[in-house]
Image: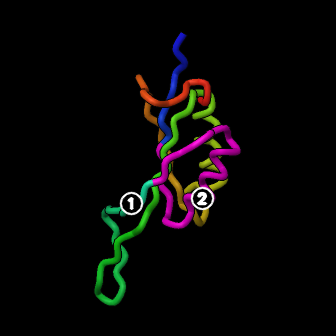
Amino acid sequence: MKQEQCAIHIVTRAGYADEVFKVIRAAGARGATILNARGEGSRHEVFMGITVDTAKEIIICVVDRPTGEKVLKAVQDKVGIGTKAHSIAFSVPVLDTVGIDQESL
């Protein structure tokens, strides 16, 4: 029987990806991909009349469903919105994968 998987996407302030990765690893994730990103939204930081882009990092990990629930909870509790990392997270179902060792999930 095929195990249900999910991709956890975590968006955090730049410079906090390593801290977030330690949290998700402790929750059961075995690996992740970290991407540099730029935030856009209705509120912008303005410094001396210049709009400053908000640097972000995105951490993506594919895990089994039960581990995904633990990862989301750990992010919320340890590096969530109320912390300096100011992370948000969401999961997306994964239907199929290629090149991922199913035993490592």
Which residue carries the number 1 mark? Answer: 37
- Mark 2 closeness class: few <14, some 14–19, many ≥20 residues within 10 Å: few
Q: Residue at x 57, y 28 (%)?
A: 64
Identify the coloring. rainbow
Pick whichever, 46 or 92, lies toward us. Answer: 92
Q: Residue at x 52, y 14 (%)?
A: 2
For marks 2 and 1, give the CA distance. 15 Å
User: Disc 2 on helix, strand or loop?
Assistant: helix
Secondary structure at badge 1 equals strand
Q: Which residue is mark 2?
A: 18
Q: Name the residue nearer the viewer: 76 or 64.
A: 64
On the rendered image, what quadrant is the N terminus found in? top right
* Magenta segment includes 30: yes
Is 3 on the left or on the right of 26, as rendered? left
In which quadrant is the C terminus drawn?
top right
Numbered range of the magenta stretch: 9-34
Instruction: Name which residue type carries label 2.
Output: Asp
> What residue is shown at x 51% (from left), y 35% (from top)?
62
Q: Does residue 52 appear to the left or right of 74 in the view shown? A: left
Q: Is residue 10 visible?
A: no
Residue at the extreme bottom: 48
Above or below residue 40? Residue 27 is above
| Left/right of residue 56 with respect to residue 46 in the rendered view | right
Residue 34 in the image: above or below residue 103:
below
Please tell me in which quadrant of the rendered image residue 41 appears.
bottom left
Assess whether residue 6 is covered by the magenta stretch.
Answer: no
Residue 59 in the image: state x and y as whole percent: 50, 50
Residue 74 in sight in this render: yes
Q: Residue at x 42, y 60 (%)?
A: 36
Whole-percent x and y of residue 5? Answer: 51, 26
Percent coordinates x, y for residue 38 in the rendering: 36, 63
